[in-house]
Amino acid sequence: MTSPNNPHFLRLGVNIDHVATIRNARGGDYPDPVRAAHLAAAAGANGITAHLREDRRHITDTDILRLCDEIDLPLNLEMAATNEMLDIALRHKPHAACIVPEKREERTTEGGLDVLGKLPKLKYFVNKLSDVGVRVSLFVEPDEAVLDASKELGAPVVELHTGSYCDAPEGAARDAEFARIVRAAKHAEEIGLECHAGHGLTFDSVKPVAAIKTIKELNIGHFLVGEAIFVGFEASIKEMRRLMDEARGEAGS
């Protein structure tokens, strides 16, 4: 594994939401997402991501409490811009909070935040979280105007939504979506934003994104949990880590 002390190192945040989804499908305590967080750490993850949704469809309040108390890796709390979620984040003070759009009827996050349309509201949340030392990121589309607005809000980090790239068919459509990510990552660096990326990444789609040297972190979850059914959770994370390191090494060569 490339050393985390290397300035070109690409961090991997493992999202454990869908371990909780499987648990909640039947009720009870198994499988335990906190155990998954420990396995992720052992497999080479650099952080843990968990999305506490309004409807608690996967991660629960108790999960967040335990993750804060029991894991050594930085916790990235994904949250909607609501007063309830703000209160929870201010109480637990995770290492980072990624503000994401949220609709009850969606199966998963469908796109980036409407930063341009909600500047005053988002500014309030960014300020409140930053005041208590929580590192704020905004989950956004790879669009330069949106990145400029994110910078104006004072968020130090943006996470680029890679779902459109991952969902696009091979060929011109995917190439166009990838080009948007490349331009956005470059622009983020130019205006002083740390750039992360995530959503829908798999073994097949991760390497081009991982090779973009201006991206500092990838957050990946659903695919890793699904692959764990066949090869185990640690093995799926180790393979993702290997592909990321390989891509980053090729980018630096």
Image: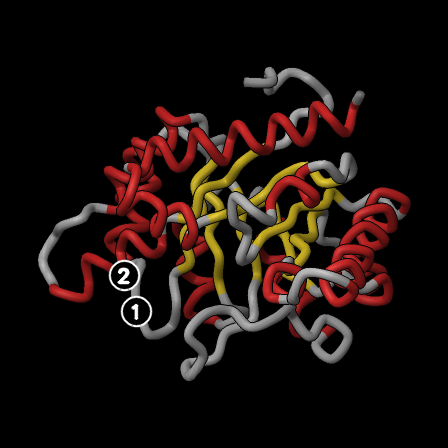
> Identity of the amino acid at label 1?
Arg
Residue most toward the bottom?
105
Quadrant showing the N terminus: top right
In the drawing, what numbered circle is on residue 168? none
* Residue displayed at 49% across by 47% down: 220
* Residue displayed at 65% across by 53% down: 159
Name the residue tied to disc 2: 21
Q: Is residue 184 above or below residue 42?
A: below
- What x and y, as percent, mark residue 3? 60, 15
Q: Is residue 198 above or below residue 174?
A: above
In primary-sequence order, the first of circles 1 and 2 is 2
Quadrant of the image occupied by residue 128: bottom right
> Identity of the amino acid at label 2?
Thr
Quadrant showing the C terminus: top right
Name the residue tied to disc 1: 57
Are the residues flagged by discs 1 and 2 in contact, CB closer than 8 Å? yes
Q: Is residue 120 above or below residue 221?
A: below
Left or right of 180, for residue 157? left
Between the residue at mark 1 and the residue at mark 2, the CA separation in whole angstroms equals 7 Å
Quadrant of the image occupied by residue 52: bottom left
* Residue displayed at 85% across by 61% down: 144
Q: Secondary structure at mark 1?
A: loop
Left or right of 226, for residue 139? right
